[in-house]
Amino acid sequence: MYKRGRIAKLVTSTALAAIMAGLPAVQALACTQVTIGNQLTSDGDTYFGRSEDYSNRYGKVFGIEPATDDGKVIQSYEYGDNPADSFRYEITGPTFRYTYVRDTPDNWTSQGDPGAKAYSEAGTNEKGVSLSSTLTTNMNAAVADVDPCVKTGIGEYSIADFVLSQATTAREGVELLGKVIDEQGSQDCNQIVIGDANETWIFMQLSGRQWCAVKCASNLVSINPNMSNLQFDVDLEDQSVCLHSAGMAQTARTAHTYVETNGRMNVAASYGKTSVEQGYGQNIRYVQGHKYFGDANLGGYTLVAGEGVKSIDNNQLFFSPTNASIDTFTALRVFACRGEGTDVDANANAGFYAIGSNRNTESHMFQVRDEYATSDPEVATIQWEGLSRSEFTVFVPSYSNLLTNVDTELYPNEANFSVGHVGIQKEGGNADKIAQNEQTAMADGDQVNLDYVLMDINTLAYNHRDTVATGAHAYLDALQKEIIEEQKTVDSYVVAAQGTEARTALANRAHAVVSRGTFEKTHKLLEEIRAYLKAGDISQPFAASDLTADGKLAEPLGYADAFTLTIDRQPASATAFQNEGTPALTVSAKSGSSDKLSYKWQKSTDESNWSDCGSSDTYAPQTADLGTTFYRVIVSDDNGNSVISESAKIEVVEKPVKQKTGSMYRLYNPYTSEHFYTANFDEMIMNVGLGWKYEGVGWEAPEHSNTPVYRLYNPYTSDHHYTVSPAERDSLVAAGWNDEGIGWYSDDEQGVPLYRQYNPYARTGAHNYTASGYERDSLVKAGWRDEGVGWYGVAEED
C-alpha cells in the first residue's frame, strides 16, 4: 500500500511515480497478497488475504461498521482535510453491516477525526462478501501518460467501505467497483481480492480508468508482493472468469504497450513495469512466497548479495504449488515467511527484505469453507485477523459476517484508540529511533489492548532475534495451533445453532472468548520477554514458561471449553432412612452454546441397566425399599449435545432406634468431607435430613466422668473440633471459634481409645476421630498426621 494523509496530503497522483522512484523499493511498496484454491488445502477450504507493510509501529482498529437504512456517504481524505479534493460517493439505499480493520484517524486527517473512517482495508459483510485490500501496484510510464490516475477517483482509502456496504455477492462487488471506476476513475493502482462462499476474484486497478478482474482457479495459488507484471492466462472475453473495462485493450494500444501472448492480450505485460522495475524488495518476496509453498516451475532469477532479487524470468500471478495439502496454520504463517533455509533467507542476509518484516502493520486471511457454500453460507467464512507485525502475531478467528460487537477493551474503536503508545512510526534504520521504540515496548502504556501487546512483542523479538525470536516464535506457534484446533470444536456449536440470532450470539461470544484468551496469553509472554531482557543474562535463549518441552501450551487456552456442555455440580451420594424423605438429588450444568437445557434422570441397581425416572434438574429418590440404588442424569442442550453425570449412590437403611444416653452418632458431610459427632439423637436425625450421611454409632460414651470433651465451632469454615484440653479450647476460642460447651465425656477408665488424626491440607474436616486402628493407619498412610488418643469411650462388657 501507499498511504496519503495528514503527512503527505499535498502529494498528487502525477507525483506518485516520482516520489516512489526516489524511495528504496521496500519502503515504497511492501504488502503481500495471497490466494489459495480449495483443491490445494487439507480441509478443502479456500483461503485469501494480505499482509500490510507500512511502518515499524502503527496502530490498527478492528471493529464493526453498522448497517444503515437510509444510505451513507463514502468520503476519502487521501488528499487532505478538504472533502472536495478526494473521492466521494453517496449510497442512497440501505447499506450492510461489515467488519473492518482501519488505520487510526490521526494518520489521515489533521484533527484525527474518527468520523473519517480511515481506510477499512479488510472485512466481511452480513451477506458473506469478504474483501482484502489493498495491494498497491503500478503502471508503466507510457500508460500513465495516456491514462493517469484520477485525484478524485476511488482508491485504497474507500474501496472496502464502498464494496462491503453494497455487495451481496463477490461478483456484484467486482461489478460495483468496476462501474465506479468507469464513472469516477481510480485514485491509484491496486490489486484487491473479493470473495464469497462460491468464488474468489482478483481485481486489478490497472490505470486511471482501466481495470480487470479474474476469477481464481481452485487448483492454483497466487502470491503478489506489489508487482504489476504478474501474468495470467484466462479468456478475457469469458465473463464467467474475467470481467474488465471496455477500454482496456485500446488504452494499451494508445500507449503503444499492447502485448499479445498466444493470441490473447497479455494484460500484465501491457500495463505493468519490467521485472527489474518492480524492485528488489518485491522480487525477493515473490521468490520467498513461491519457495514457501513450493514451486517446481519457479524458473530463474537474478540474486544480488546484500540486495535481494533483481529480476525474475517467469513472473506469474498463479502457480501450482508442490505442497498440495496446505493446512490453516501453513496458510496463516505465509505472512511471517522470511525465506528461511533458502538462498533468499532474510534472517541470514541482513540486506534482504521479507514477507514477514518489521514493517507489517496487520495481516488477515479469510477461510471460506466449501462444504457450506450452498447449504449454509451464513457460517461459510472465518476471518483470521493478525494485528501488528505478521512475524510475531496470533491470528484471531471470527465469524465476521455474523459478528455484531467486539470487546472494546481489547479492540478500542477509532474514537477511543489512544495512540500514545505507538512511539516512533518509522525507524528508517536509525539506531536512536530503534532504541526509543524498544524503550516504549519495555512497559505497558496508558492503554493495553491486543494490538499494542503484539506490537511490543514484535519490537522486542525482532530487535533481539538471536536470543528472543526463536522462543517467542515457538510459543506463538503453539498458541496459534491450539486456537486452530479448538476452533473446530467451537465451529461445531456455531454450525449446529438454529437461526441467525442464535448464531450471532455464539459468534460474538466466540470472538470475545478467543480474543480475551489470546490477550492474556500474549501479554504474559510479553511480560516474560521484558523480564528476560531487563535481567540482562542472555547465556540461555528466551523460553516461555507456558510452553512444554514438546511444544504445547502448559496451561490450555480453554477457548473450546467455554462452549462445551459440562456438569459443574454432580449429584451426591447419601444414606437415607426407610420411608423417610431425603434431600433431592441435584445437578448443575452449563452450555457455552445454548441457554436451554433438558434433563433425564435414570436409576439402576447394578450401574449397567438403567431406566428413566425423572425429567427436571432435581430428583427425589424413593426410600420405600431397603438397599442401594444408583442414580444419574443425562443433560442435553438444544444443539444436540449431551453429557452424562456421575452416578450417585443412595443407600436406604432402617431408621436406627434411639440408643441409650451415651451412644455417639457419627455422620459424614460429602460436600465438605467433615465428620460430625453427637450424643444427641434428634441432632443426628436433623443433620441426616440436611444431607449428612449417617455412619452409625462410633462409640459409647459415659453419661458422666471427670474428663469432659469440649465441642467448638468455627463460624467461618463451618467446621467442628473436639478436645479434652481446656488450654486448646481456650486457644481456639481466642482465635474466633465458638465454645459450644461439653459435647460428651471421656471414659476415665480408658476403655476404648478414640484416635485423633489431622489433615494438614484440608480447610474443613481437618480432624478425624475413630475407634478403629485400621482407619487410623489408613489415613496416616494417605498423609494424615497421627495425633495420638483424643479421648476414650466405654469398653463393651464381657
Image (cartoon, rainbow, N blue to C red):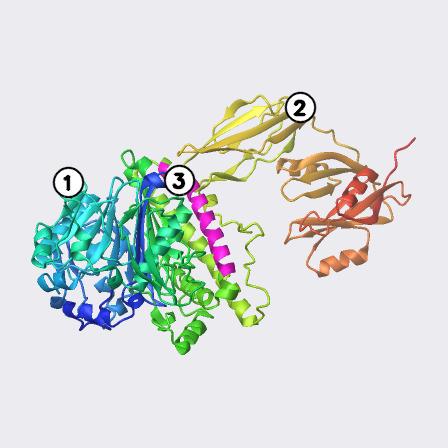
Of mark 2 and mark 1, the one earlier in the sequence is: 1
User: Is residue 315 visible to the viewer in this orientation of the structure?
Assistant: yes
Q: Amino acid at mark 2?
A: Gly
Magenta stretch, main secondary structure, is: helix
What is the CA distance from the residue labelled 3 to the residue labelled 1?
A: 30 Å
Residue at image point 38% right, 63% down: 357
The local secondary structure at tag 2 comes to strand
Mark 1 lies on residue: 238
Disc 2 to disc 1, how far (Cα)? 81 Å
Residue 317, horizontal then vertical, whole percent: 26, 50
Look at the picture and state if 688 lies above or below 442. above
Q: Which residues are magenta?
A: 470-495
Q: Which residue is mark 2?
A: 627
Residue 501 x, y percent position in the rendering: 31, 41
In the picture, measured across the screen, residue 421 lies left or right of residue 757, that is: left
Q: How many dots with numbers?
A: 3
Residue type beneath disc 3: Ser
Q: Which residue matches tag 3?
A: 42
**Mark 3 secondary-structure assignment:** loop
Mark 3, mark 2: which one is toward the viewer?
3
Q: Amino acid at mark 1?
A: Asp
Cα separation between marks 3 and 2: 56 Å
Q: Residue 793: x percent and y percent?
A: 84, 41
Residue 507 percent coordinates (x, y): 35, 45
Q: Is residue 403 visible?
A: no
Is disc 1 placed on a helix, strand or loop? loop
Q: Residue at x 50, y 60 (%)?
A: 470
Residue 621 relative to residue 189: left or right: right
